[in-house]
Image (tube, grey):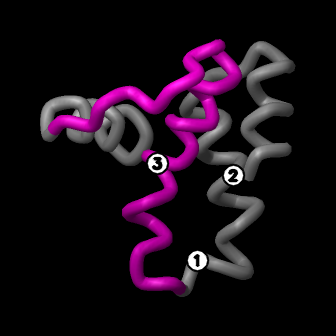
Amino acid sequence: MIETVGRVHKAGGTLKQAFEATRDALAPEFGHGPIFGHCLPFDVQRLWDAHEGIEHPRIRTAERDRAVWTQLQG
């Protein structure tokens, strides 16, 4: 996950592209897990933030969670 998100970020891709690449890379091994699809958008967002220079995780709110979910899963 760290490598995939980093590669997309470094290449100038988007958060959505990083999410899709990470999902495609991890789904064969982990996609059957009950919370894989739920947690992945938020995990990818956090890694993306780190590549953007945000050192500490941003506070999660219901509004922010909906926005991340819509952007990546909508």
Q: CA distance from mark 2 to mark 1?
A: 11 Å
**Which quadrant of the figure has residue 24?**
bottom right
Q: Are marks 2 and 1 in contact (CB under 8 Å)?
A: no
Q: Position of 44 compared to 42: left or right? A: right
Task: Give the image location of residue 47, x and y in percent.
Answer: 62, 36
Q: CA distance from mark 1 to mark 3?
A: 13 Å
- Which of 46 and 26 lies nearest the eye of the viewer? 46
Which three-letter amino acid code belongs to the residue tagged 1?
Gly
Please, is residue 36 above or below residue 24 in the view?
below
Which three-letter amino acid code belongs to the residue tagged 3?
Pro
Label of residue 41 in the image: 3
Direction front: furthest residue: 56
* Residue at x-position 32% and y-position 43%: 69
Q: CA distance from mark 2 to mark 3?
A: 10 Å
Q: Is residue 46 magenta?
A: yes
Q: Are marks 1 and 3 in contact (CB under 8 Å)?
A: no
Part of the protein shown in magenta: 33-61
